[in-house]
Amino acid sequence: MISTVNNTLLGYLASQGLLTPVTAGNIASAGNKTESTDTSSSSKETISQTSLDRAAGMFKTATVARNLETAQVALAADLRAALEKALVKLSEPVQFSVNSKGEVEVKGNEKDKAAVQAVLKADTSDPSLANRIATQASDAMALSNQIQQSAAISQAAKSSKTPDGVISLYQSLMQQTASTSVVFSVSATSSSLTYPGSLKAKA
């Protein structure tokens, strides 16, 4: 559970016009003094897509998202090149994710999955393709968390009338966010990197 509001985030939201400086100051002050536990009026509210879209469209967030998009395209191209060198062409898209142990997991049909796993195992590049996939997932997860956090506090600030109410709703919204899921999908001709907030962030 998040018990305090990040002052840096509040300052940035204020600079982007999502919060007035006075409101940001009041929220920060309330968050540092007390932890509100009254979430009865907001327990069913979740972060809206509009809030996510706006947070994803913030300049710094969108810039990071564009950099991630550029990197995933390059990574997919390098992966295809490694597969081509091994005389493998994907028949269907394969999906990469990273488990709690930091290990890259591959999903796809059995033939493509086996071929990709063999290529990753034989890869001697530095950093390796597997390490690049894991790093990419970590970077995307950090960005997604930032987008969701920004969206939650922006929505809370708009919906609540008091600093304590903002803190309470913000905490409630963050409690209900799903675990960030990052999926890197690669086919013979295209690729994508998806995570909460990614679609609008890439637009």
Image (cartoon, rainbow, N blue to C red):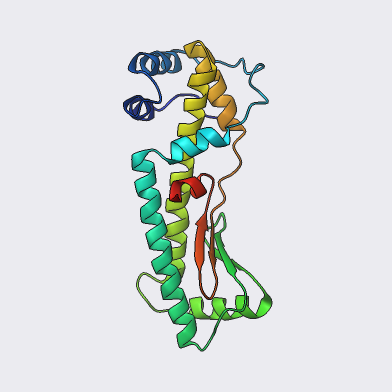
User: Which residue, as the protein is rendered here, is positioned at the far top?
Assistant: 162
The answer to whether any part of residue 146 appears in the image is no
Image location of residue 93, percent across then percent down? 59, 70
Image location of residue 64, percent across then percent down? 36, 49
User: Which residue, as the protein is rendered here, is positioned at the far left?
Assistant: 15
Marker count (numbered) = 0
**Nearer to the camera, 95 or 70:** 70
Vertical position of residue 15 compared to residue 146: above or below:
above
**Nearer to the camera, 179 or 41:** 41
The answer to whether any part of residue 73 appears in the image is yes
Left or right: where 90 falls relative to 15: right
Residue drawn at the location 45% of the way across and 87% of the way down: 85
Vertical position of residue 36 compared to residue 54: above or below:
above
Image location of residue 83, percent across then percent down? 49, 81
Left or right: where 189 falls relative to 58: right
Residue drawn at the location 46% of the way across and 24% of the way down: 4
Vertical position of residue 139 compared to residue 167: above or below:
below
